[in-house]
Amino acid sequence: MTSFDFQPRTRIVFGPGKIDALGELASELGARRALVVSDPGVVSAGHTARGIAALERAGIQTTLFDGVHENPSTDDVSAGVKLAKRNDPEILIGLGGGSSMDCAKGINFVYSCGGQMRDYWGVGKALSPMLPMIAVPTTAGTGSETQSFALISDSQTHVKMACGDKKAACRIALLDPELTVSQPPRVTALTGIDALSHALETFVTTRRNPISLAFSRESWRLLAGNFSRVIAEPADIEARGNMLLGASLAGLAIENSMLGVAHSLANPLTTVFDVPHGQAVGVMLPHVIRFNAAVVETQYLDLLRDSDNGSAHVPGLSGGVAGLADFVSRMLAAAGLATKLRPLGVDPLKFQDMATQAAKQWTATFNPRPVREEELLALYQQAF
C-alpha cells in the first residue's frame, strides 16, 4: 500500500481559442494589475499581444516582462522582480514555454517572499503567501503549468535549482492548442520528447502511486499516439491539443511522483555542453528504460498493454521493454534529433565528472533502480 497526499491546486481550462478568456479568468481571481512574463519568440509570434489584449479588455492594467531566456537564470528572475516592484502586480501570467512559466514562478517567490532565488532551492521554503498565477503554455513539453516547482539556473555556477512550494502552484492552467501551432519543428520535437519522458519516468518512480499512475497512463496514451502526427502535420489542431493536454497531465504526474535518472543524466549534458534539455533527456531515455527494466519490467509491460501494445494508439511500437526503448529512439530520429551523444559534440573525457554531477541530482533518488556514479558513467558510455 502506497501512501500519498493529493490536493488539486490548479484549475485546467482547455480548448482552441481559450486565450481570449484570459482576462475573464484573471478577473475571477480579483486582479486589476497583471505582470505578463514571456519571451521574445512568443512575443514575435503574436501570442503575448493576444493575451495582453484579452487582459486589457477585462480592464486589467498590464505590464510585460519579456526578458526570459531559455533555461531561465537568477538574473532573469532579478530583472523581473525589479519590474514587478515598480508596477505592484496582483497576478502573474506566465505566457510561453517552460522557461517563461518557471521564470514567472521564480519572480513570484522573490517578489512575494523576499530574499534571493537560491533561498528557495528545495521544497517548502516560501514563508509568505504568493500572488495568484495563471500559466498559458505555448509548447507541449515541461508541464510546468501543473507543477509547483520552478527550475532556475544560478547565473554564477550554472547549477539548475529546483525550487518547489505548494504556494507556487498556478491557480489556473489555460491550455489553448492554437498557441502551439506556430512552434518551429525543432521546438515541437524537443518539447514533445521531454513530455514523453515525463510520462515514462513518472510511471516507474519509487514515489508512484494510484493518482500519479492515472495521470501517467493517460499522458502516455495522448503523447505517444500523437507525437508522430504533430511532426508530420504541424497544423493538425487535434493532435496539437492531445499533445498539450498530455504534457499537462504528465506535469500532474510529476507533481505526485517526481522523475527519475534520465533527467539526472540530462542536466549535466545541458550544463556542460549546452545540449537542449529535450535532446539530452531523449538521448538518455532508451538506455535508462533498458537499465530500469531489471526491476520494473512489469510496469513497463503494463504501460504497453494500456496502448494495446502499440496497435491502436502508437503505430510501429513492438512489444516488450526493448520495443519501448526502440520506440523512443525512433521518435528521436523521426523528429531529426540525435540518438547518440557523439554527434552532439559531447567529450567522453568529461563523463566521469558528469556522472558525479548526475549522482547529486534530486531526481536520481526517485529512480526505481538505485544508481551510483558507476552506473551513471556506464549509461553515458552506452549512449555515446
Image (cartoon, rainbow, N blue to C red):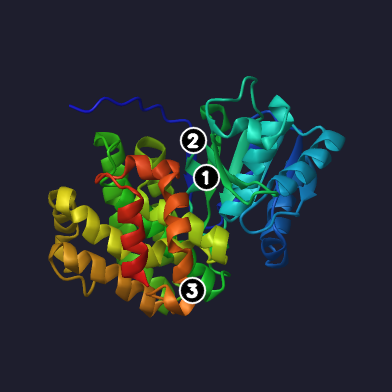
Q: Is residue 166 left or right of residue 377?
A: right
Image coords of residue 219 (percent x, y): 33, 52
Where does label 2 land, which residue?
Answer: 10
Where does label 1 land, which residue?
Answer: 145
> Nearer the viewer's eye, disc 1 or disc 2?
1
Alpha carbons under labels 3 and 2: distance apart? 28 Å
Alpha carbons under labels 1 and 3: distance apart? 23 Å
Q: Residue at x 41, y 47 (%)?
A: 359
Please state which amino acid type lies under the numbered disc 2: Thr
Say if mark 1 contacts mark 2, CB within 8 Å: yes
Please state which amino acid type lies under the numbered disc 1: Glu
Q: Residue at x 37, y 64 (%)?
A: 380
Measured along the vertical axis of the image, is residue 335 above or below residue 5? Answer: below
Question: Observer-nearest residue: 371 or 60?
Answer: 371
Specify few, some or many for label 2: CA neighbours under 10 Å numbering under 14, 14-19, or 20 or more: many
Please state which amino acid type lies under the numbered disc 3: Ala
